[in-house]
Amino acid sequence: MNIADYKGVWVFAEQRNGELQKVSLELLGEGRKIADKLGVKLTALLIGNNVKGLSDKLGVHGADEVLVVEHELLENYTTDGYTKVICDLATERKPEILFIGATFIGRDLGPRIAARLSTGLTADCTSLDIDEEGKYLLATRPAFGGNLMATIACADHRPQMATVRPGVFSKVDSENKAVVEEIKVNLTDADVRTKVVKVVKEAKDIVDISEANIIVSGGRGVGNKENFALLKELADALGGTVAGSRAATEAGWLEAAYQVGQTGKTVKPTIYIACGISGAIQHTAGMQDSDMIIAINKDATAPIMKMADYAIVGDLNKVIPELIAKAKARKEEA
Ligand SMILES: Cc1cc2nc3c(=O)[nH]c(=O)nc-3n(C[C@H](O)[C@H](O)[C@H](O)COP(=O)(O)OP(=O)(O)OC[C@H]3O[C@@H](n4cnc5c(N)ncnc54)[C@H](O)[C@@H]3O)c2cc1C
């Protein structure tokens, strides 16, 4: 392999049912910076059936170029089909970097591609940079339960691959209009061994907390499932959503999809209200970039109080009802 032959940054633009996943746009935002540092093009890979219409959006969020691959066998994600398309393209066009969002699909796809291309993959990264001298990718990810941040480089193989955690990076807006190239592929049933019989969406109405603007989050200090109703009432009064620490999800007070932190979701709301949460590093890793943090805790020395913009020392069972009353009164005034 001659490394000098490999050029350009690629981002897999994951779409489901014709809708781009937010992490793909975040990746374009970060990919733009990486491509500019290297002085190369940023390319989005758009794969599916009847998805070409999404190209404009990829341009506006930073892509110089969109490679569109449409085929009826690519309508639904399959490991086989998508791996084949991406590996064929990467072998032919030789990108130096390939980023994939660490969604359920991305975590399935990334390792398959890396093994087929015999290259290195860093999973679930939370920070990306370019080495000033060597010009190679520096991919950083939490390891050992977040106690260690490992920065990993892939020196001798290309493309350098990373799956990247959703919610960590920000999307950028530009006036850019991407050059769109449609690529024809010959796929047969034999290429796609997985047959999607039916896509079942979980019937439960689960809110994606990483999209929420206001989050009222509860921890062990909430005490029991019933008390979470209080948090929900505050969230409703503020037009936000509830979330929680791992202590809260493990106790069964909240579903796992609502967990904030290193093994949960990363959130960046305008306001994060932490109720009865101590502020363990594994929790704060998922909410420290919130615009404003308000902490309610009995213990004035809890770590969360130090990082809070507003710290209320008190029993949440007394403080929250007062906040609810205030929020409701303001709503009525408005
Ligand atoms: C590998 C690994 C991964 C992890 N991933 C995550 C993760 O993704 N997310 C996560 O949250 N945790 C995670 N954890 C767990 C984390 O280390 C903490 O144990 C957890 O965040 C603690 O949750 P808590 O703050 O709700 O509970 P506690 O630490 O028990 O804090 C409860 C707080 O409530 C206060 N309190 C009690 N009663 C009241 C009251 N009536 N009014 C006001 N305040 C009150 C107490 O003073 C205390 O500060 C992980 C741990 C490991 C080892």
Image (tube, helix red, strand yellow):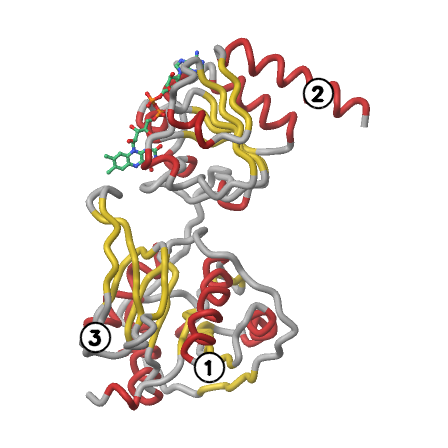
Q: Is residue 10 left or right of residue 240?
A: left
Q: Which corner quadrant of the figure contains ligand 1? A: top left
- The answer to whether residue 290 is visible is yes
Q: Position of residue 34 (x, y in %)?
A: 42, 71
Q: Could you tell me which residue is drawn at 56 percent across and 13 percent down?
A: 319
Q: Is residue 323 above or below residue 250?
A: above
Q: Position of residue 212 (x, y in %)?
A: 55, 41
Label 2 and label 3: CA atoms lie apart by 58 Å
Label 3 near label 1: C-beta < 8 Å? Answer: no
Amino acid at circle 2: Lys
- Report if the CB atoms under discs 2 and 3 are less than 8 Å apart: no
Image height of 56 relative to 334, above or below: below
| Residue at 29% across, 86% down | 91
Q: Residue furthest right?
A: 333
The quadrant in which the N terminus is found is bottom left
The C terminus: image quadrant: top right
Q: Which residue is labeled 3 in the image? A: 155
- What amino acid is at disc 1? Lys
Number of numbered discs: 3
Q: CA distance from mark 1 to mark 2?
A: 51 Å
**Camera-side residue of 207 and 97:** 97
Secondary structure, mark 2, is helix
Say what secondary structure mark 1 lies in.
Answer: loop
Q: Which residue was labeled with disc 2? A: 328
Residue 222 visible in the snapshot = no
Residue hosting label 1:
41
6 is higher (above) or lower (below) than 138: below
